[in-house]
């Protein structure tokens, strides 16, 4: 086997594959988009066969562009969209229903009934999560209840459940391996993150038969080898991890107190809490950051539903700007004496509010408000929401005091936004040179397990910053802005926080 690492980065809108050489440089890349399906309001689905076909095409394309074959690859790493749920036939590998995507809200009423029945405290204690349709357990229950004969087949052991990583592993290995890693398991609402086992009481709560569950392994582990017919040779699968945790590793946030935040359409922020399983008092999520050598490292996670999505709305739906790249110039040209607040609750507010019924609002409009002020408000909302997350994390955990925020995702190209985050959150913001942070995290797991990449310290030593942003905003300006933001959020909430 050669020294190359092949990573499958299976995302929400596209499947990508990247080949890294022995120097950790990218030498081949393949990418293919796939179709989003919206069969009913609030429903989002993917076709599993299309996910598989696009991943296979991306892998073959990346190998071809790298000028290598499967025989030159030392190991495969997989990182995937989390929570998206697939149930398939063990014998054929065919899904019995479309993949229900993490964004899907069809189980909201079922989750609300369980919440009203007082089940959320038990679930949160064991999983670190909330009773929300975002997670996989309710989705799997819906499939078993709504596909004819599914529950009977599940009880007989004919079906398999998993997140996208499990589905890909099953396909890659020719059906020999049904497994997932601890990070993906921790997002199902079925896995006890303290005992590191599937929880029988939670399986009963969602009526999930234990025999359809995958085996849970470390994030760097032996997941079998690909069937030679898939890519042309048997390649060990040595790294599996959810995409946001992969980004944490890609940013080399291996030490407690280190934090990454990914800014795309939405935002996912993870704070490494080490061996401390922090029970949040502020409705943040507790999750497994990664599990190595049988030992779990934990994280606090905050989700912001809309960051870059607000800029996309101004661009695509209102025509306020033609390209997202114009945002910095428009923010600079805006009138600082017009305090406009855009609360982008288009699909509700995420952490720490978790108010699915809130809806977006703009405050402070005057006859003198122009396009530039609206764009500035959308960019500022990224900083304000990040401040809300970090304030909650600091209140939850004493180790969150001296944070340097490592950032990635499409929005980090905006220097104005990154500087505003540094100013309003009062942290350093560190932007890396490498744009492929998520794939690199999965590559490290596979490469380290295969013995061709360095240990965590050696990997961290190779991370390079593109630019660092430090707070320069006067304290009185910051406080005035934050007071306005908090008033705007209070007006937007569908209910007063308890």
Image (spheres, helix red, strand yellow):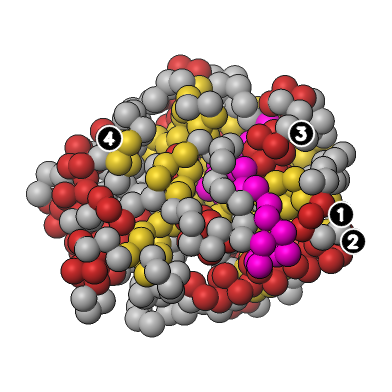
Tell whether label 1 touches label 2 (CB within 8 Å): yes
Q: Which residue is mark 2?
A: 67
| Residue ranking furthest to the left | 117
Name the image quarter holding residue 56. bottom right
- Res. 107 mark: none
Q: Magenta region: which residues?
A: 228-252
- Res. 126 mark: 4
Eyeballing the image, is 363 above or below 471?
below
Quadrant into which the C terminus falls:
top left
How far across and how far down the image is residue 463, in percent? 79, 33
The mark that comes first in sequence, 2 or 1, is 1
Magenta region includes residue 243: yes
Measuring 20% from the left and 67% from the top, which residue is drawn there?
151
- State how far apart marks 2 and 1 are (Cα): 9 Å
Q: Which residue is mark 3?
A: 453
For the residue carrying disc 2, how many other residues have a C-alpha within 10 Å: few (<14), some (14-19), or many (20+)? few
Residue nearest the observer in this picture, 164 or 72: 72
Per the image, label 4 sits on a secondary structure element best described as helix
The mark that comes first in sequence, 4 or 3, is 4
Q: Is residue 400 visible?
A: no
Per the image, label 3 sits on a secondary structure element best described as loop
């Amino acid at each position: 086997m050669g020294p190359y690492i092949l990573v499958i980065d299976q995302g929400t809108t596209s499947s990508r594959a990247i080949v890294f050489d022995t120097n950790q440089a990218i030498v081949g890349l393949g990418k293919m988009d796939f179709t989003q399906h919206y069969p009913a309001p609030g429903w989002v689905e993917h076709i599993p066969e299309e996910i598989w076909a696009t991943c296979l095409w991306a892998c073959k394309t990346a190998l071809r562009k790298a000028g290598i074959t499967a025989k030159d690859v030392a190991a495969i790493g997989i990182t995937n969209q989390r929570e998206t749920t697939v149930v398939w036939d063990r014998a054929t590998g065919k899904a019995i229903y479309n993949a229900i995507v993490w964004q899907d809200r069809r189980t909201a009423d079922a989750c609300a009934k369980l919440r009203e029945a007082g089940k959320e405290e038990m679930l949160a204690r064991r999983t670190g999560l909330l009773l929300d349709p975002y997670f996989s357990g309710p989705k799997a229950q819906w499939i078993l209840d709504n596909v004819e004969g599914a529950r009977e087949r599940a009880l007989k052991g004919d079906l398999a459940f998993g997140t996208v990583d499990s589905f890909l592993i099953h396909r890659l290995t020719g059906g020999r391996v049904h497994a997932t890693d601890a990070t993906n398991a921790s997002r199902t609402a079925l896995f006890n993150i303290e005992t590191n086992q599937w929880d029988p009481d939670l399986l009963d709560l969602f009526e999930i038969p234990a025999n359809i569950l995958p085996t849970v392994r470390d994030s760097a582990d032996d997941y079998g080898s690909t069937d030679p017919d898939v890519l042309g040779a048997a390649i060990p699968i040595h790294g599996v991890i959810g995409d946001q945790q992969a980004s944490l590793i890609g940013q080399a946030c291996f030490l407690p107190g280190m934090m990454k935040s990914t800014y795309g359409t939405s935002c996912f922020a993870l704070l490494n809490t080490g061996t401390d399983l922090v029970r949040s008092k502020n409705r943040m999520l507790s999750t497994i950051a990664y599990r190595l050598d049988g030992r779990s490292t934990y994280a606090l996670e905050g989700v912001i539903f809309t960051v870059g999505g607000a800029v996309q709305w101004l661009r695509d739906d209102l025509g306020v700007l033609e390209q997202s790249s114009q945002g910095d110039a428009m923010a600079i040209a805006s009138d600082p004496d017009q305090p406009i607040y855009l609360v982008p609750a288009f699909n509700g507010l995420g952490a720490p509010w978790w108010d699915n019924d809130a809806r977006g609002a703009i405050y402070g409009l005057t006859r003198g408000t122009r396009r530039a002020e609206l764009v500035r408000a959308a960019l500022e909302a990224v900083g304000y929401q990040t401040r809300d997350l970090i304030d909650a994390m600091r209140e939850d955990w004493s180790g969150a005091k001296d944070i340097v925020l490592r950032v990635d995702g499409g929005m980090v190209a905006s220097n104005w936004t990154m500087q505003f985050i540094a100013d309003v959150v009062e942290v350093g913001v560190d932007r890396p040179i490498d744009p492929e942070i998520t794939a690199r995290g999965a590559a490290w797991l596979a490469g380290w397990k295969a013995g061709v990449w360095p240990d965590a310290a050696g990997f961290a030593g190779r991370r390079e910053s593109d630019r660092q942003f430090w707070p320069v905003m006067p304290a009185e300006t910051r406080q005035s802005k934050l007071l306005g933001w908090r008033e705007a959020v209070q007006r937007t909430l569908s209910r007063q926080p308890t």
